[in-house]
Image (tube, rainbow, N blue to C red):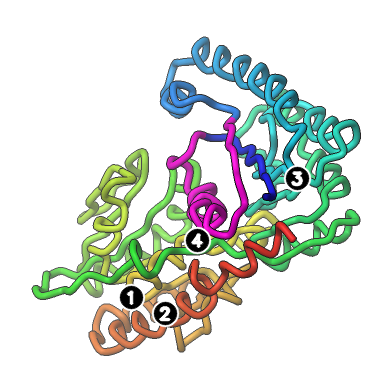
Amino acid sequence: MKKVYFLAPYPLHHAPSQRFRFEQYLPLLQEVGIAWRFQSFLSEKGWQVLYQKEKAPAKAFHVLMGFLRRMAVLFRLSDCHYVFIHRELSPLGPPVFEWIIAKLLRKKIIYDFDDAIWMADEGDLSGLLLRLKWHKKVAQICSWSYKVSAGNAYLCKFAEQHGAKAFFMPTTLDTEKEHIPPLKTSKHHPLRIGWTGTHSTLKHLYLLWPVLEKLYVQHPFELWVIANRPPEKAFPSLRFIPWRKESEIQDLAQFDIGIMPLPDDAWSKGKCGFKALQYMALEIPAVASDVGANRTILSNGESGFLCSSEQEWLDTLGRLLTQPELRKEMGQKGREQVKRHYSIVSRTGDFLGLFA
């Protein structure tokens, strides 16, 4: 029986990047005779304080404990065949743990990432913290890995440039049991344009704020925002829904149109279109910026819409607000696209192939 040790930043069942990239496949591993174990850098308590304000001492304590947890796990890898690393083994410093696993313990590393994490998002971190993040370690880990599982072609190309054997493994959804479109038996007015994300990505929604304000004057609608913090900008019909794992799908299903604005920059090329995929799986017509993986996920005008200018956003959203049949058609075609290419069913073979 093959044995795999999964090492990830966060506890199970919390972080979307983990839940939709590998956690949902764990029961399938058992079915095919692959045993697995798991360890996170942060404990459950550490996760709970991570996004709380003014908790610096507690956060520092849990980071220290995380390093101790990683040191301890090195002594538990002797009988495993693969070590699956999601993103990184520690949030700060060079890839010491990864080097030990690859070079001293000689384990086969399967390295998984879904963002351009080798780049520094300078708007969110101080200069010192940026240096401590040690972004260049991503290239080093790629070079030491048995296989790299990357969320889009741009990420695969980066891994290959550093000597890795890279495999395209998109972020996937469970279209059979979880992301199921609800039966909409009643109509509401005004219609709802929705966005979901974290406080760190609200800045992307703000890029579209002038368009939404103009659009509201022409076609009144409700702006729904699902996040862990409310927007800091005012809007005439804003409705903020705190993100909760238990109700995320039901909350998203209330959208009539889903939006995913992004800047056209190098960082966005590494994004894997998760917001758009969620909208599409729930038969919500998706409108996204014409950048990066969005161009692969969305067939413009067929399974959703891509926009590259304010006027395109204004025209596209206006059409969707005023044409119910177009919304229905785009929603249905979007879900079919997800089922064919971005569902658990369609990608199970690819995921299991990582352990061959």
Query: Could you tell whether 42 is left or right of 330 in the image?
Result: right
Q: Which residue is mark 2?
A: 334
Assess whether mark 1 and mark 2 are in contact (beta carbons under 8 angstroms). yes
Task: Give, as a three-letter code, the residue at label 2.
Answer: Gly
Of the two numbered discs 2 and 1 on the same chain, state the one appearing first in sequence. 1
Estimate the x, y position of residue 198 in percent, counting from the top left: 44, 44
Alpha carbons under labels 3 and 4: distance apart: 30 Å
Task: Give, as a three-letter code, the residue at label 4.
Answer: Phe
Number of numbered discs present?
4
Of the two numbered discs 3 and 4 on the same chain, state the one appearing first in sequence. 3
Q: Residues within 10 Å of mark 1 (few under 14, many from 20)?
A: many
Q: Which residue is mark 1?
A: 283
Give the extent of the magenta segment. 11-40
Of the two numbered discs 3 and 1 on the same chain, state the one appearing first in sequence. 3
Assess whether mark 4 and mark 3 are in contact (beta carbons under 8 angstroms). no
Of the two numbered discs 3 and 2 on the same chain, state the one appearing first in sequence. 3
Q: Residue at x 40, y 78 (%)?
A: 335
Alpha carbons under labels 2 and 1: distance apart: 6 Å
Q: Residue furthest left?
A: 186
